[in-house]
Amino acid sequence: MSVLSQLNVIQVSGLTKRVSTLEGSLTILSDINFSVKSGESVAIVGASGSGKSTLLSLLAGLDVASQGDVHLDGEALSTLDEEARAQVRAEKIGFVFQSFMLVQSLTALENVMLPAELAGDHDAKAQAIELLEKVGLSHRLEHYPSQLSGGEQQRVAIARAFIGSPKILFADEPSANLDSKNGHLIEKLLFDLNKQNGTTLVLVTHDEQLAKQCQRIIHIEGGQLEKISEGAAVNVG
Amino acid sequence: MWVKLAFKLFSREFRRGELTIIFAAIALAVLTVFSLSAITERIGLNIAQKSSDFIAADRRLSSNHAFDPQLLTKANELGLKTAKVLYFDSMLFANDELVLGSVKAGTNTYPLKGKLTIKDSLTSQAYEVATGPKAGSIWLSEGLFYTLNVKVGDNVELGAGVFNVSKVLVKEPDAPFFSLSGNKRVLLSYEDIPVTKAVQAGSRVFHRLLFSGNEQQLSGYYAWLKPQLKSNQNWEGIKDRQSPLGNNLDRAERFLLLAGLFGIMLAAVAMAVSAKRYCERQYDPVAMMKTLGGSRRVIRNIFLLHLSLVTGFSIIAGLLIGFILQTIGADYLANFMGTELPQAGMRPWLLSGFIGLICALMFSLKPLLDLFDIPPLRVLRRNLGDTIALSRLHLVLSFLTIFVLMWLFSGEIVTTLILFASTLLVIAVLYGISRLLFAAGRSLGLRPGSSWSLAIATLQKRANANAIQLISFALAIKLMLFLVVLKNDIITDWQMQVPPNAPNMFIINISEQEVDPITQFFTDNNIAHEAFYPVFSGRVDAVNGEEFARSVSKQEGEEKDEDAKEGVNREPNLTWLESLPEGNEITEGRWFTDGGTGGDEIEVSVFDGWRETLGLKLGDTITLLVNEQPIEAKVTSFRSVDWGTLKPNFVMILSPNMAGKIPVTYFSAAKLQDKHTKDISHLLQRYPTISMIDIKSQIEQAQSIIAQVSLAIGFVLSIVLISGALVLISQVQASLAERMEEVVILRTLGAKGRLIKLATLYEFMLLGAISGLVAAIVSDVALLVIQQQLFSVEGRMHPYIWLLGPLSGAIFVSAIGYFMVASTMRQNTQGLLRKIA
């Protein structure tokens, strides 16, 4: 493995995703190639149905490619089974979703601790509290998701994404379900924490303004990589 | 590692109420099975005890010949309690009056079961004692006091001995229910038999050995006895098929069994629904955990631990609630019956615990496996995994489980099959109907914006989910209707057997000349009475000219109808009649031509039970010995006899053209009241040869047992109804939770609460009515089969449930739906939106 590819925390080569439908095989993503360096922030943009969410699911190992491969921190996802991919996610990946995806029966603090606990780490409480303080929710530790506003729920989700200090953070339309004020707050938090932790950020959005805050923007159109452009952010890597 | 997380999740889920339905369903299954099986077992034990009372023992061995003493020695060795009883007829003499009495002599252990009822004098109160008279004294039945003109304390001669009359014998536990020996009964000590010198070689006597002990001792003894049983010896258990109460109690037991089966089915439906629903609600958390890197093993362990915990807790809760329920129920029953119900053994505990475990395992397993298969991608694609909910494997597994549970509980494959098949029929019919209906509904073209059109649209949109709901509603309604109708039928049937104006006194030994004056007496005193039957005793001597006694083979098996065999050896009561008596039905052949009054050929109609024993077929000629005079009769029909009626039944009925060929006495029955006592004693003095058999106590006993068992049935029915109602509630709740999203969207879009509530009301009303109608139809068909197969009563249709089913279904289901959706409507829309987010 070359030094260059070691620096590329995500390496995507010839990535294709096909699904079978009643009318036959449908290609959702076709021959996608790009790489993301460690600590870099990348936005994946495209219209609805362009295939950006599918790309995210392949990058995170939530789904498997029909062709091509994703190397995540040096590991080829195509060679791993579901269990091993879960292990990779547990060790290296954090997530923020559009619909927050908090476990309703756990408190804010417990939701943040969940990834650590699933990985067998039961001493994550201090880190979880610290993260919740960073997202401004130190007064909401024992609240359940249903007792929190949408913005607060997404802040819990962000705190959860950073627990265990993941190398890569995937965010799927993180502010789409929020009003603009809360949306901006969330975006700011995400980028701030990303900088503080030196995490690689891959962000799926259709919001051009949000995308521009990243260092690079990958444009997906009709399942194909249209272009990669520079964002407004300064390279911190 | 994962255990802490699992417990944390469990306690939270529990507090949030996510596990409540699954918990309630398992607990319901356990408590239903526990309380029903415990009550059934306790009543069953009580019934067995009472039945034992009827034969004064658990088993008895009867013969016309003396027994080998070895038989008693062996029984005592095995730890059985034993008693010897000897029956014979002997002359009694006192105050220049001579009368033939039916004597029973028992050892000091007689009766082994039940009590003797006696009075200190003719006018004093009756009370119960455990043993018979001491040597030297005898007890006489009331009739003998009048005939012999004696009172307590006088001496009477019995055979060659002189005895002191010490008590009035009111009732023996094993007294024959209907016997021509009448009320001239004598009880004395076995030790006194030699004193009477009445039993000599060649005397007509009847020997009985009584045994009591536990089932193991009894079956051990029977195993030893069976190979050496002689054809003139008759082993009899507590299942006395000709006891009028036996049939009723048997039906009651069957009802309780059915109720238990229904309870299990209902709980299983609740369990299946709630397990599926619980697992579906866990799809998102599982997908999330997988996304966050949770391994399959950890997730599996977490949910298996949840299932184990919820199963454990709910079984314990079910057992506790079940125990409390059955204790309250049994206490109430025992109070009402004025007896104590014996405690149930371990079976209800083990059975209900086991059934709870099986329910939890079998109904949750497939949904849980599906849950583990939820792809992590669901976090991005929200509908992934929704389609795997209802698999064929799950259906097959669920049906198989219900079948095995029913079989396990009942131990009866036929009952289980009938119920199971009828349930499958409901499901098939309903599935078909729902598909058709929801498809056809599309073309109805109702006005948009109306509650009805919204209701129909919702029904169509959720055709699949509705089909499942329809099925579970209908199942619950079917089971409830079924039990309600069966209960009514059984109880009506019983009450018909003992109508309020049923005769309470049999009058026997009436000579032909006495018929007219006695009829006059009844008319004068305004006493309701039945017709006078000619009665005579006869012995079957030959069939088609072949002497009969040697052609009867010995019957094997303890449970066979031993009464029938005994009947062959004894001289049964016979009659001639012009028409078929009530409660009898021709099973083969035809009733006498012209009522059997014409022609010379004598015809005979034979009770089915005797047909096999005697090896008879239509057209055979039977030779009866009546007073040593042979009478030949041709078998022209076989009859079934309802031994459940409190009326005299005859194993053979001859054609009336034999009148005048033999001397007969007449029999009648009358309804007497206390005010008639004096007139009756006048009558008895005027016609001293007639005898009265007081069956008031038997009728009262029958009525009280019917009342007790009806109450028990009512109690059990209410448990099953509560289970059914809970199933319906949980179903409506589950379905409402599923349509919460729609309600919220409609609400958000500004739909009026009234529109939503009415739409829900109509939708559930339609669902309830359709379910109720199908349930009623299938119940009625299944009832026809069940009544004939299991309850030996004539199956009949019940048009009222065709209305009751849909009506109660519509009202109940829509009411629950309405109130639940109404409570949702009271919350503000923002709160609702957050709930479904």
Image: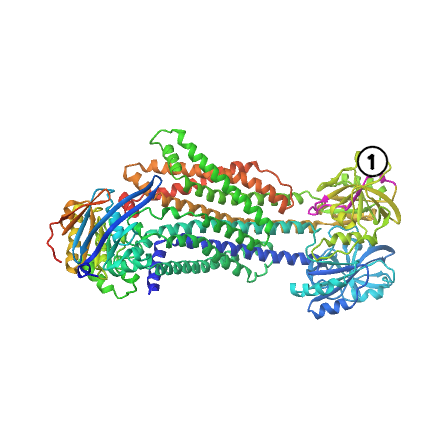
Q: Which residue is mark 1?
A: B597
Tell me, yes or no, whether the highlighted magenta stretch contains residue B472.
no
Q: Is residue A113 above or below residue B600?
A: below
Q: Residue furthest right?
A: B629
Q: Residue at x 26, y 66 (%)?
A: A123
The three-letter code of the residue at mark 1 reads: Thr
Query: Hey, which quadrant is residue A164 in on the image?
Result: bottom left
Res. B161 image quadrant: bottom right
| Residue B661, horizontal then vertical, whole percent | 88, 42
The spot of residue B791 in percent (x, y) is 63, 46
* Drawn side of residue B155 relative to residue B53, left or right: right
Give me the residue at 74% from left, 46% from top. Answer: B608
Whether residue A20 is visible to the viewer of this picture, yes or no, is: yes
**Where residue B704 sits: x, y (%)?**
63, 51
Secondary structure at badge 1 equals loop
Residue range in magenta is: B640-660
Q: Nearer the viewer, residue B6 or B711?
A: B6
Q: Is the magenta region chiefly helix, strand or loop?
A: loop
**Residue B555: percent from the left, percent from the top?**
75, 56
Task: Left or right? Give the position of A208 relative to B60.
Answer: left
Decide which of B62, B461 is in the foreground and name it: B461
In front here: A29 or B606?
A: A29
